[in-house]
Every structure is written in C-alpha cells, then in structure tokens.
Image (spheres, rainbow, N blue to C red):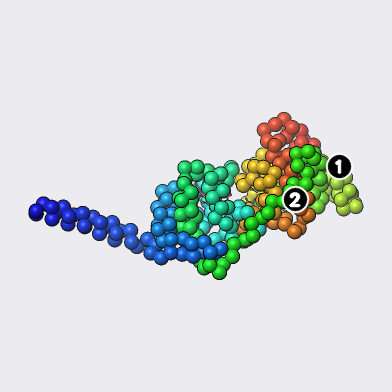
Amino acid sequence: MKGLNLALTIIGLTALTALVSCSESHFKEDKIYAGGVYAPAKALNDGKSVYTEYCMPCHGVNGDGKGTSAKGLSVPPRNFLLGQYKFGRVVSGELPHDEDFYKILREGLTGTAMLPWKELSDTQMFNLVQYIKTFAPTKWDGADKKLGDVIVVTKDPYGEAHKESAIQRGKEVFHAVAQCWTCHRAYVSHAEFSEINQKINGKPVTEFDPEMYHVKLQPNDYGYSSMPPEFTYDSVRSAKTVEELYIRLNAGVGGAAMPSWKGVLQDDEIWAVAHYVKSLMDLKNTPERQKLLDAAK
Ligand code: HEC
Ligand code: HEC
C-alpha cells in the first residue's frame, strides 16, 4: 500500500512539475483573428510546439527572425513581430489569407533558406499559422480586422497559342510602359530600347541610363535591402508559372520596393509581362542566356 502511495505521489508531482513548467508560456484563451478566423487555445499551444521544433532555429524564439541559424543567411528569415508579409495572394500591404501561408509552407520560397515543409499535416499548418499571428497581435487580433481581397486570376488573353505575341508585348511593357528595368535591369540593346520607346512613347531614346543593365538594391520595410531578381539567373521565390507570375505582379511583394501593378497596368499588359518574365526565367542555364546578355549591354 505504501509503495502504491509513493508511486502515486511521484506521478502527481511529475504531472504538477510539467504543468508548472509549461503553464507560463501556454495559451489559455481562444483567439479570433482578422477575417473572423477562430483559433482555439489548443491550436495555439500545438502550433507553438511545432514552431519551437521546426521554425524557431531561423525565425527565433520571439519570432523576430533572429534564430541561431539565421546568422549569415543572405535573405534573412521573416521577422514576425512586424506582421508584414511578402508573398500573399493579396495586394502588397494587406493581410494574407491562411491559404497563402499554407502555399508557402508546402512549396517553400525558391532560392532562400525557407524550404518546403512537406511533412506537415493540414492541422499542423493551421496551428502553426495561428501561432505565428500571436507575434503581431496589433495586426491580427479581432474579428473586425479585414484580410486583403484575394487576387482573382482572369483568363489569360494570350494562352499557349499566342505566347510569342505575349512575350513581344511583355517586352514592350517591361521596357517602355512599366519601366521594370529601372530596378531589375534592361534585357534589350540600346537600339531595341530606343525602338520600343519610339513605338510606345512616340520618341526615340538618345541618352541611355549608364545603370540600365544593372539590378539595383532596394531598401525594404524589414530593415535590410532586397535585390530585385535578375530573371535569367536568380530564383523567383514565389512563382514558377505564368499564372503565379500574374498573381505576383498584381500583388507586388509586401513591404518591398516591388509594387503592385493592379490597376496601374491593364490586365492584358500584366499577362503579357508575366509571359515575358517567364521567357526570361526559361533562359536560365541555356546558351541563349549568354546571347541575350551579350546583345543587352
Ligand atoms: C532555415 C531557415 C528557416 C526555417 C527553419 C524556417 N524558415 Fe520561414 N523563412 C526563412 C526565410 C529566409 C524567409 C524569408 C524569405 C524571403 O524574404 O524571401 C522565411 C519566410 C517565412 C514566412 C514569410 C512569408 C511571406 O510571405 O513573407 C513565413 C510565414 C515563414 N517563413 C514560416 C515558417 C514556418 C512556419 C517555419 C517552420 C515550419 C519556417 N518558416 C521555417 C527561413 C526559414
Ligand atoms: C521600384 C523597384 C521595382 C520595380 C519598378 C519593379 N520591381 Fe520587381 N522587384 C523589386 C524588388 C526589390 C524585388 C525583390 C523583392 C524581395 O523579394 O524582397 C522584386 C521582385 C520581383 C519579382 C519576383 C517575385 C518573387 O516571387 O520572388 C518579379 C517576378 C518582379 N519583381 C517583376 C517585376 C516586373 C515585371 C516589373 C515591371 C512591371 C517590376 N518587377 C518592377 C523591385 C522592383
């Protein structure tokens, strides 16, 4: 009898210690977030433990992006305290939807330390995302807060059949309508640049920006500077297809210099420039890449 009592006391004590050591940081209350998303306390607690195991090394104990493995990464992990995100399917600056985070978790951000997390279950992803929101309560807490409108993918007016004319039109948009080259760099010769500008803006170019063939580092809201990708070489982080590029161009990159082109360019111009950027991405590791760069310098 005595032995049993002792055993029970030990079990009781162990349980108590476990309770005390965890209770400090455990969530006891459910939360209601922007867009009316309901996060039970249990989901937040479960999310926290998965976060601690998988995400903390980079994103940090406090979510500030300064985990032990973050040192030396050329693209720093997101600082979740800011409540600002780059790759939602919403116009830059608006709050993304849970589904946007799931996509990033499933696919990763190409070319960065943010890898795909294929082993996470749907429940784990839900819990993680709800937990991440606790780092930025002023942005997320409250059912009255709004999420951004999801970018609607219209019908591609070009499609595979008219891909070549899309690329041609996209090249004009890139170099003479939207001036994407001012941050990203130009991909045509001086002569072609002048020709395109003559066609689109009614006058030739005689004086050329000496920096037109260089990508230019841009300050961002995260406290460091982002390099615009050189599409024939660098990774595009959130888009592999023309459709995903269309979404990214409409959305922009949140908190970074890359603006949203929604309402700035016509919808068919956005499709065209998405096809053009994809054609540049397809040159990666091909002999044609060098030919293009030799012509554009
Ligand atoms: C090896 C380091 C590393 C680990 C581990 C890691 N991340 Fe990241 N994460 C990054 C980097 C780097 C970025 C920033 C990429 C960028 O700015 O393009 C990022 C960005 C993000 C973003 C921001 C997306 C946006 O639209 O701005 C989210 C959300 C995110 N990570 C969630 C997670 C979660 C959840 C985990 C754990 C399952 C995790 N990360 C694990 C490195 C990491
Ligand atoms: C004011 C400077 C600026 C202009 C103008 C600009 N961009 Fe960007 N762009 C950036 C920066 C900076 C990034 C990198 C952002 C980051 O990941 O932090 C970027 C990223 C991108 C990406 C990659 C997104 C990803 O998922 O990694 C694409 C595609 C892109 N820009 C296309 C364009 C196109 C097309 C235009 C013109 C219609 C354009 N940009 C105009 C600065 C600019």
Where does residue 271 sit, x and y in percent of width and height?
A: 75, 48
Q: Is residue 113 left or right of residue 199?
A: left
For residue 122, side relative to residue 174 (left or right): left
Outermost residue on the top side: it is 287
State yes or no: Cβ of the residue under disc 2 lies below 8 Å from any atom of ligand 2: yes
Residue in view at x 61 percent, y 52 percent? 87
* Mark 2 and mark 1: Cα distance apart in space: 25 Å
The location of residue 16, given as percent across then percent down, is: 25, 59
Q: Is mark 1 within 8 Å of ligand 2?
A: no
Q: Residue at x 80, y 40 (%)?
A: 162
- The amino acid pointed to by label 2 is Ile
* Mark toward the start of the polypeptide (2 vs 1): 1
Which disc, if any, is residue 191? 1
- The residue tagged 2 is 270
Q: Nearer the viewer, residue 258 or 144?
A: 144
Instruction: Please tell me which residue lies in front, 72 or 153.
Output: 153
Choose mark 2 or mark 1, whichever is in front: 2
For badge 1, the amino acid type reads Ala
Report the residue at 75% width, 59% height from top: 263
Q: Is residue 60 left or right of residue 139?
A: left
